Image: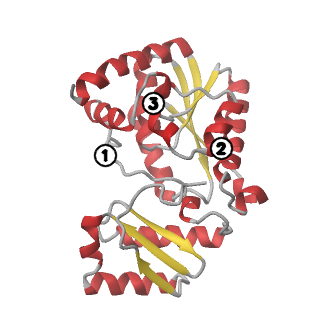
Amino acid sequence: MNAGCSAAPKLTLLIDILKEIESAVIAYSGGVDSAFLLKAAALSGMRALAVTGFSPTMPEQDFLDAGEAAQLIGVSHLLIETSELEKDDFRKNPPDRCYYCKSELFGRLKGIAGSEGYKHVIDGSNLDDLEDWRPGRKAALEHGVRSPLIEAGLRKDDIRYLSRKLDLPTWDKPSSPCLSSRFPYGEPITLDALKRVESAEKFIRSFGFRELRVRHHGDTARLELREEDIPEMLKPKIRMLVAEKLRALGYKFITLDLEEFRSGRLNNP
């Protein structure tokens, strides 16, 4: 059975689930999953408000992209400032770091839902997320957040396939987790270091690299690229320009990981 045959009934089920939900505040990052959920919400006719948490832990471009996608889909969009960076439990970067971030976000969304008359808070978690280390999932369950994509049995491949069929510009968007995921557990997360990582990745993307991570190890930056992109990075001009930029940002050592990029390399307990 091809992806289309298996995914299409799941979209129908998802829309039925959203109709049953009736109204919800949607935890919306603008990524593949939450943009697809937003589109499905619009198709279902439910009352929905997309809310994006704004903080230094997220790349600025992600917020801009989220706003554009929400406008395209036609769902009201609200930006709220979150303050996870002010919490010691988050800054110390323990293995359950994401729990503290998501707990604050979902708490805020519950408050908005209550004050604005929405029945639920929903997020874009999918079935694949259940197979990874996701401390934020615990926060979602504690706050009674529903995950309609999981309820409909949708995996990432389904979501990308259906997003393409629905003409969503996010269908092939690379994953873009928060910048704190670039820090090995136990490495303190600071505002300065977050800005350094964001600037480094933005510069490297200017050469046309789509999927990458700059892992922050104190005064060392470890670059992860897709296997097919490694030869391009090793071209003398690009290699030297990247090294010069990252040194200017404060890194003393710039390394290239010989293993190819894999999302979630540091996302293990």
Amino acid type shown at disc 1: Asp
Horizontal relation, residue 221 to residue 190: left or right: left
Q: Are marks 2 and 3 in contact (CB under 8 Å)?
A: no
Q: Secondary structure at mark 3?
A: helix
Out of 71 and 139, give the one closest to the viewer: 139
Label 1 – label 3 distance at C-alpha: 15 Å
Q: Are marks 1 and 3 in contact (CB under 8 Å)?
A: no
Q: Which residue position is annotated with label 1?
A: 172
When asked about the image quadrant of residue 219, the answer is: bottom right
Out of 109 and 96, give the one closest to the viewer: 96
- Residue at the spot x=65%, y=69% of the render? 187
In the displayed structure, 182 sits above or below 108; it is below
Would residue 74 be seen by someone viewing this image from the given angle?
Answer: no
In the displayed structure, 147 sits above or below 95; it is above
Horizontal relation, residue 124 to residue 115: left or right: left
Horizontal relation, residue 190 to residue 199: left or right: right
Marks 2, 3: nearer the viewer:
2
Which disc number belongs to residue 37? 3
Is tag 2's residue or tag 3's residue first in the polypeptide sequence?
3
- Residue at the spot x=63%, y=63% of the render? 185
Amino acid type shown at disc 3: Leu
Q: Which residue position is annotated with label 2?
A: 102
